[in-house]
Amino acid sequence: MLYSNPMTVAVIGTGFVGVVSAAAYASFGNTVVGLDIDEKKVADLQSGLVPFHEPGLPELLREALDSGNLTFTTDYKKAISNARVIIIAVGTPSKADGSADLTYVHAASEAMAGYLQPGAVVVVKSTVPPGTLHSVDEIIGKHTDVSYDLASVPEFLKEGTAVADTLKPDRVVIGATKDSTIKILSELHEPFNAEIVVVSPESAQMAKYAANSYLATRITFANQIANLCEHTGAQIDEVLSAIGLDQRIGSHYWYPGLGYGGSCFPKDVRELKHFAEQVGEVPNIFSAINELNEKRIPGIIEKLDAAVGGMGGKKIAVLGLAFKPNTDDMREAPCLSVIPKLVEKGAEVRGFDPAALSVARQILKEQSGLLLVDSLEQALEDADVVIVLIEWPEFVNFDYSMTKLDKKQWLFDARNQLDPAKVKSWGYEYIGIGQN
Ligand code: UGA
């Protein structure tokens, strides 16, 4: 569906959320300018190159560029002076104390302020703590005399399925108070064909933290039940399928594993923990979730070490270096905690990933005990232990009987995605999560 009345939109920040959003708004017929201070990124995007792995995004970007609805620039004046809606989608990393670092949000606010056209709506899409619009308002107000309004429209897309999540979201949350702003933003999001929830800016910001923290809690809960299963003869997958049929619980999104990673859950849980502590909400659940998640990998590696009779001298294939399938993002990826522990225990590790190899080569320095290889087969060569760390389909569907050797071999299925009976029939010792 295209708009009858397309808008001029500027998206500040061409990271993950910025690029996907800019291309999506342009695909519905709006005139969109993506703005970034990084000249190389802007030049790459303008020529259709996406600087990270995201299925479907190169095609969406190419279409938007070819339609003439999307351009990229480093020039604030060019991007902002014609824009009806300005979307701030810059990064908000965590500070050392766990609070959100708003430096880039504030810098973008200051840089755009002088070019705002009267009636412009400035939307914060970056994940920010409730109350952030006050500081944004103060900064913009100091640098312009024109009338403008502010709103918060958080992003709920997942990496790996970002295009589908953005074009067909479960809901659009608009945090705004002024009727004219609610009207503009409702019109902008109309073609997304999703339920629009209009709330206060603070509620929108809290909803973003609450959604991520709730999902992180679900995962941590499943992981802790999995630990208990290992002491009881119960199987975690059977337990989850049994309770998931309760409509109040649901059988989605809490598959056990090595804990949650990525650029969002760990950071957002820590930020909510910090916020809770600041307002005197102690003890709080976020602190427990964060601690359990941080301790998960060290605990599992010890169990694995015992199960394989010590890792010293063993050849270990680590399959999956990104934080999850269909991305090359390695922020808080499990391999970053797992590999150093294996190397420390004297294992010879070979790591492989279908998309994240070049990112991995920058982050994980090859060292004695670690080799990053170019194919699954190379990683599996002569391995004593195979670790399916990330559930890429090529690892889940691989026939490991082809690499079975005449020696004892173990397969650790860190996401419970393989069929234990099949793995055992190939001659491997199977180790899963929350199984006996
Ligand atoms: C997450 C949220 O799902 C998005 O809604 C949100 O917009 C995004 O953060 C964000 O704040 O930007 P994302 O980090 O891309 O999206 O990835 P998820 O698919 O949610 O996975 C997060 C972590 O949880 C991964 O490490 C994944 O392996 C783990 N996970 C996920 C589990 O351990 N079990 C599950 O059942 C699902």
Image (cartoon, rainbow, N blue to C red):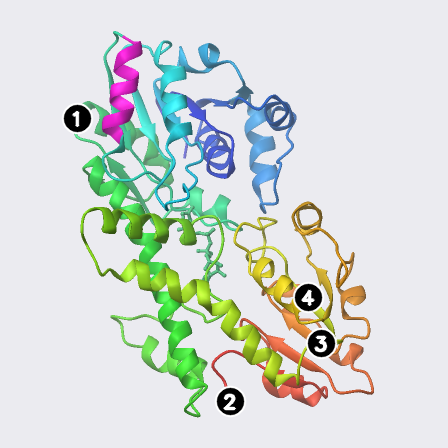
Q: Residue 326: give x, y in percent of width and height.
A: 59, 54
Q: Nearer the viewer, mark 2 or mark 1?
A: 2
Measure how far apart labels 3 and 1 are at the Cα level. 64 Å
Residue 119 seen anywhere in this rendered image of the structure = no
Q: Nearer the viewer, mark 3 or mark 1?
A: 3
How many numbered marks are there?
A: 4
For badge 4, the amino acid type reads Val
For badge 3, the amino acid type reads Gly
Seen at 65% across and 48% down, the residue is 363
Answer yes or no: disc 4 within 8 Å of ligand 1: no
Q: In this figure, which residue is indicated by the disc labeled 2?
A: 436
Q: In this figure, which residue is indicated by the disc labeled 1?
A: 178
Q: Is residue 324 magenta?
A: no
Main secondary structure type of the part rendered in magenta: helix
Q: Which badge, 3 or 2, comes first in the chain's sequence?
A: 3
Q: In this figure, which residue is indicated by the disc labeled 3?
A: 312
Q: Residues within 10 Å of mark 4 (few under 14, many from 20)?
A: some
Q: Nearer the viewer, residue 321 or 417?
A: 321
Q: Which badge, 4 or 3, comes first in the chain's sequence?
A: 3
Residue 133, picture quadrant: top left
Q: Residue 225: give x, y in percent of width and height.
A: 38, 78
Q: Magenta segment, which residues? A: 133-144
